[in-house]
Image (spheres, coloured by chain):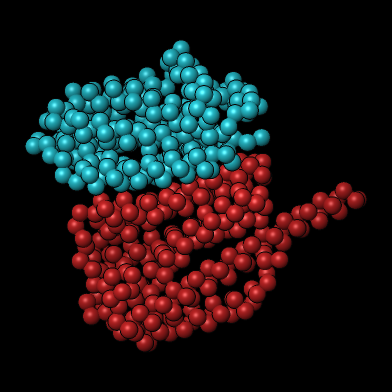
Chain colours: A cyan, B red
Amino acid sequence: MISTARAILRKDLLIEWRTKESVPAMVLFSVTVYVLFHFGLDRDSLDGELASGVLWVTMLLAAVIGVTRLFAAEREQGGIDGLLLAPVDRTSLFVAKAAALFLFLTAVELVAVPTFALLLLGPGLGGAFPELLAILALGNLGIAAVGALVAALAAETRARELIVPLLLLPLLVPLLIACAQATEPLMRQDAGTEDLGRWLSVLTLYDVVFVLLSVAVFDFLLED
Amino acid sequence: MYSKGLAPLAAAAAVTITTALALVFFYAPNDADQGFVQKIFYIHVPMAIVALCGFVAGGIFGIRHLRSGDRSWDMRSYVAIHLSIILGLAVLITGSIWAKASWGHWWLWDEPVLVSFLVVFLLYCVYYPLRFSIEDPDRQARYSSVFAITAGAFVPLNFIAVRLAEKYTHPRVLSQTGGSLPGEMRLTFLVALLGMALLFVTLWKLELTAKHASMQLKRLRNRARVAA
């Protein structure tokens, strides 16, 4: 199962490397949203609640792009038939897709978070490490699990581009709450870490529930 | 096949709801703090509880459908979610009215139950576009069940997260669990809750019967057309 998942993941990363479709689009989109927030809020620098809110809302919106494109290669080129004809366990397909999404999100954050600090963040990122890394990792894991499930759910519908954001964003509300609340003290002028443990445990609970749930129900998607 | 026991169930629902309304207006005392307005509580809270139970029941029916492959379970799940969404809209409206009357605002973001309910409602509204944009009936049933299970598990998780995010506990006249309700109010509330639950089950069976009948009619028509 692991080797199958690794093969699919390798294929996805190779496609992304050659076409450069999802990740650059997500990065570009994130930066555009920062510009929108700059003008929409009419603020030159943000801190505290506003900063963590803008950072995480932008991440979730960028994730929508990645999730919409997650099964694009399979669908457009008919590769899904090949994948389903091959004796591939659905769980390994889920693991591969979630891992690909996780890596895409990490790649996006490598650029988008420093850009955010440069463009909008008042206090600077220095005080936020290493706690921010843990929050980003747990947040990415949750987005990846829910995103792979939503992508598979929407893959067979007619109104795919419509279903993905409508389904993904409400499902991510608890994740947004936990991530934004955990990040908020780190982005204050006097960076603190209160309540970090509580929010990290909420995030972990969310991740565990959705990883298990997605593995359990993924078998019933993308059949026939 | 679904209509068994429908008539007595409907009668029981009618009687219980009439009793509940009578109790609300003639038996339960006016709330000392909020006065007459508080009586919307006997409609609003039972509707919310029944709607949430309906969502979770939809998820459980979804599990049974995926396990057995029997599409009638998907139909049960669909009707439960459909009715819960209608109730959910009523919950949001009555909740908003109650908030305006007792707190002076149509919407309060620091009221975790209200906010969680809105998120859950928004998620379940996507059930329709998802379900009806899949044509193949088997696949439609399967995908809808997966949605029902995912969203059913999401309901408690969302309530935990939103409740934790609340910073200021709103001063409450009475706790919604009914734990601190005076005796007469609690009795009225329980009767109202029972009435709402019976109404839900009645409507659910009725809708299933109607769906079953119309499907059978379609099948017979097709057969008649083939024969002719």
Residue A175 image-quadrant placement: top left
Q: Please provide percent x and percent y for residue A215.
A: 50, 40
Q: Is residue A200 left or right of residue A206?
A: left
Work out whether residue A140 or residue A116 is closer to the camera in this orientation and state it: A140
Q: Is residue B100 visible?
A: yes
Q: Please provide percent x and percent y for residue B136.
A: 67, 41
Q: Please provide percent x and percent y for residue A13.
A: 45, 19
Most extreme residue toward the right is B228
Work out whether residue B63 or residue B171 is closer to the camera in this orientation and state it: B63
Rendered residue at 23%/33% (across/down): A132
Q: Is residue A25 left or right of residue A50?
A: right
Vertical arrangement, residue A49 with respect to residue A58, above or below: below
Q: Is residue A48 visible?
A: no
Rendered residue at 33%/58% (across/down): B114
Most extreme residue toward the left is A190
Vertical arrangement, residue A124 with respect to residue B186, above or below: above
Q: Is residue A105 left or right of residue A159?
A: left
Rendered residue at 58%/70% (across/down): B202
Most extreme residue toward the front is A2
Q: Please provide percent x and percent y for residue B107.
A: 29, 58
Residue A117 image-quadrant placement: top left
Most extreme residue toward the bottom is B26
**How many numbered badges does the structure rendering display?**
0
Rendered residue at 21%/60% (across/down): B169
